Amino acid sequence: MLGYGIEKDPRKALSMYKKAGKWDQASAQYKTGLIYLSQMVDDDPSRGITYLKEAVKNKFYQAAYVLGAVYLEGELVEQDYEEASEWLELASEHNIYKASYLLGKMYDSQLFGEEQKDKAIPLYNKAAYKIAAARDRLKELNQPMPQVANKILNA
């Protein structure tokens, strides 16, 4: 598999995850997608994208975050900010805090033509519970810290 107590064998791991993925096991579809994206066994990232989309259909929303990041980065697929924002929005709606932060950064920057801090701030607030960089950005923007984030900082 991937080396937890046994020798690493990405090809065998891929085979096992693909078998489980055929039964709509979302976590297996997600891991299959990650293996394809890592290009450990194949250099066709489109296969990884396909598996990640299947995982999202089966409500594994971490896969939506990965898809958003892949489209935003543009190294494995053609860069597409609209596609990235759609996947990140879906992941953020399902409390994937990294997606909220990344989507906030997209709005905070000029990726959509102009800064849209009014859209970025609520996303940073959501992400602030888990992401230190979101808390830092809220401070830079002179925004109040969410109460739970304040508890984290003052613990």
Image (cartoon, rainbow, N blue to C red):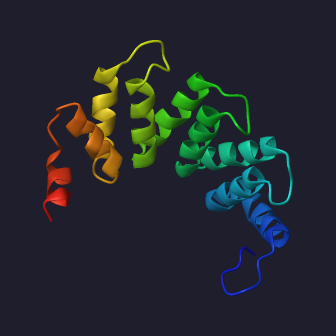
Left or right: residue 48 compared with residue 96: right
Horizontal and vertical percent position of residue 59 = 55, 49
Spot the residue most to the top: 113
User: Which image quadrant is residue 23 in?
Assistant: bottom right
Is residue 96 visible to us here? Answer: no
User: Which image quadrant is residue 71 in?
Assistant: top right
Identified at 77% across, 58% down, the residue is 22
Horizontal and vertical percent position of residue 8 = 76, 77
Horizontal and vertical percent position of residue 28 = 68, 62
Horizontal and vertical percent position of residue 139 = 21, 39
Spot the residue most to the bottom: 5
Identified at 32% across, 43% down, the residue is 134
Front residue of 72/85: it is: 72
Identified at 39% across, 47% down, the residue is 97
Left or right: residue 64 compared with residue 50: left
Q: Indicate whether 70 appears above or below 62.
A: above
Left or right: residue 55 compared with residue 60: right
Identified at 78% across, 44% down, the residue is 45
Is residue 24 visible to us here? Answer: yes
